[in-house]
Amino acid sequence: MPSHHRLLLALAMPAMLPSAAIAAELRSEPPHVHAARLKQAPVIDGRLDEPVWQDAAIITDFRQIKPGDGTPISERTEVRVGFDKDNLYIGAHMVDRRGPGAITAGVMKQGSRLPDDDRLGIILDPFGTGRGAYRFEVNLNGVRNDMLYQNGQPQGEWTVIWDAAAALTDDGWSAEIALPFKTLPFDPNVKAWGFNVNRAIRGRAEEGVWVARNRAWGPTITGLLTGIENVDRGLGLDIVPTLGLRSMRYYAQDHTDEEAKPSLDLYYRLTPSLSASLTLNTDFSATDADDRQVNLTRFSLFFPEKRDFFLKDADLFDFGRIGGPGDSNYQLRSGTRATRESGRPFFSRKLGLSPAGTPVDLEYGGKLSGRVGRWRIGMLAVRQDEFAPATGTRIDASTVGVARIAADVLSESSVGFVGTFGDPGTNGSNSLVGGDFLYQNTRFPGGRTLEAEAWVQHSDTGGVTSNQDAFGVGARLIDTAGWRYGVAYKQIGRGFRPALGFVSRAGIRGFNVDGGYTNLIRGPLVQSVFTGLDAERIEDVNGRLQSEALALRPVEMESSRRDVLKLYYMFNTEVLSTPFTIFSTVNKRVVIPAGRYPFNDYGLDFTTGQQRRLGARLNFRRGEFYDGRRLSLGGELSWKQSKHFAVRGSYDFNDITLPAGKFSTRIVGAGADINFSSRLFWTNLFQYDNVSEVAGFQSHLHYIPKAGQEFNLIVNKASEDIDRDGHFRSLTAEYGARLSYTLRY
């Protein structure tokens, strides 16, 4: 039996064990609230002045998780819970004795995250598993943000229809949330839902929670919500027609393409926890532009997904915890994001985009997502239209897909499988199979969390006959305060080519080690201080060194206003087996010869809290670079005139001197955001870099009259200085409009 098949069998074994027999821990009896059935629906205007709210259940016992540990929240917080046949209602009255001017509410754009605003947050686990949950947040401006938890970790993207509003009161502020039962997947046979409430008071750097453990809250740390019964879940059918209008001007060819593109999305809930969706003639015209990056490495860059179609249910396709922890305290400085993401079996940017990043039409697609018992299921198949790359053979239309299945095992862990088929970037054949085991224990002694994972993959590419395996293992001990440790190993064969995945470099084995200590100061100025180190070593499969880095992180401080300062010192080694072209333009080419290059450098990163009216980012790095020197400076200034208007400008610069030549790279950015209300906003972004010599401008007007209805106007323009003479010529101009409307049954 091949080794990868043996490992797949080993990963599957926990799923075959009785869950009751392998449950490692027992939960203590959590607090609970019994929702009251309301006689009539409250008006969602942010004010709890209607008599119907007097019938709702009340929660008042909120405890601090920041800066205190279990002490009562500093300001009285009263949360009411009720429901009728259509909606679950949450109402909150939040006293703030500092006065209305002290309430932080800088975010105005609907759907934005709210890390630095005063906010009300709700967690719901309607299946009562303690593993997955939905999170809903609202600030004083009525801005709604939602996210999905899977295996206890926030996934960040989950867009559904719900309503919320907020208002100032005489003694603070209040908020109302309406969560339609037609929106919430839930099992009517589950009588007790996981439920928690969070309040953030940013001016005091304070967070309070109804139920907490070890300064944390999440789907594994909740109370119980009971009483939800006899409600209308509807047919579980959403019909979303969309009409897109687009005009694309190509100046070099003196040609204009114009099209009217109708599209249709259908969503149907097959069971309380399993949904199917169908998309026809998918339209990506409302997608925001990627942030510019300059690549000074030998390997591919990683660009995150921004298209709504692929972001929805994206968590179901996560595999092996590839990508690394999301918390900033646990981001390894020694490695790049591309290195951490390398080995992903499924990367949605391979679909609907050419290798050059230009859009490719998707004719249709289907998705199955949700749960069946303790199994989580995610399946996606799309038909991609033919396209002609900038160079090379025309790529035929193709059908490609991915399937991901994972089962809950132990008390908080899972075992899963992944498979992909098809190659959207070539006319060749490709498939992949893999398995992973994810362990999590949030009740590890000492109030810490223990995570571990093991995964294996095998690709099958036409014309490749060997070295198509990849595997990895890792473990980390996490705590919000005190010591944390982590170790990981990853090996990727030379022939491992996941056509629907992401690999920054193949034929390698990589080692990562990290550790550090977080001290919670809880002072008026400094909230926490972290000290640590992390190291990475990447070799080829024969043990020959490719890259090595050791990062000393003596001080990383976070203030009570969420300002962050980081200092570091890096020891690096790069080994080039072949010459490396690090810089290339029409007029200049810099090539580093093959050889071994040890070099050291140091740097500083500083960012202000997002709630500040005048914000700043500063990145500084200086020292050796290969056999030369590098000075890197980056910065951004932003000014929020009010919650309605903000401007920003950025400049990132590298000045590099090598024996092979001297060169500089620059990225310039500028933006302006006009928020007419929380439902109508206009964003503008300009970007330029001196490597591509392309200047791009995007203007996006976005109107959301109500949840489930959207209108977009988009202008994209690009110009290029081909001759590097300071004179830009127009490349393309795109004008588009997009209207979508959700019909719910």
Image (tube, helix red, strand yellow):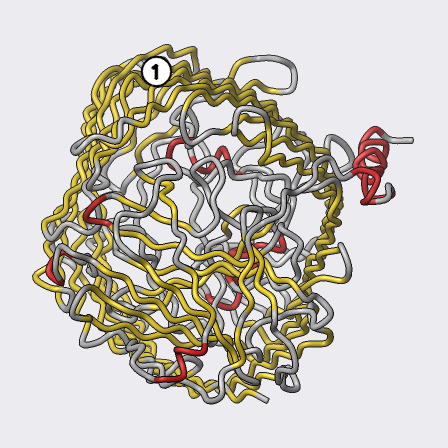
Residue sitting at 38 percent across and 72 percent down? 286
Q: Can residue 485 be seen in this view?
A: yes
Is 515 positioned to the left or the right of 47 in the image?
Answer: right
Is 549 positioned to the left or the right of 613 in the image?
Answer: right
Residue sitting at 43 percent across and 12 percent down? 595
Tell me the quarter of the picture where residue 175 sits.
bottom left
Residue sitting at 58 percent across and 49 percent down? 30
Tell me the quarter of the picture where residue 632 sits.
top left
Residue 171 lies, in percent from the top left, at 18, 65
Q: In this view, does 77 lie above or below 206?
A: below
Tell me the quarter of the picture where residue 593 sits.
top left
Secondary structure beneath dot 1 equals: strand
Residue that badge 1 annotates: 552
Nearer-the-camera pick, 73 or 494 = 73
Q: Is residue 607 above or below residue 132?
A: above
Residue 46 lies, in percent from the top left, at 30, 76
Q: How many marks?
A: 1
Nearer-the-camera pick, 225 or 107 = 225
Location of the C terminus by quadrant is: bottom right
How busy is the neighbourhood of tag 1: few (under 14 within 10 Å), some, or many (20 plus)? some
Residue sitting at 43 percent across and 71 percent down? 90
Location of the N terminus by quadrant is: top right
Q: In this view, does 394 lie above or below 654?
A: below
Residue 396 lies, in percent from the top left, at 63, 66
Is 663 positioned to the left or the right of 320 in the image?
Answer: left
Q: Can residue 736 be seen in this view?
A: no
Is 285 positioned to the left or the right of 564 in the image?
Answer: right
Q: What residue type is labelled 1?
A: Leu
Residue 273 lies, in percent from the top left, at 69, 68
Nearer-the-camera pick, 727 or 440 = 440
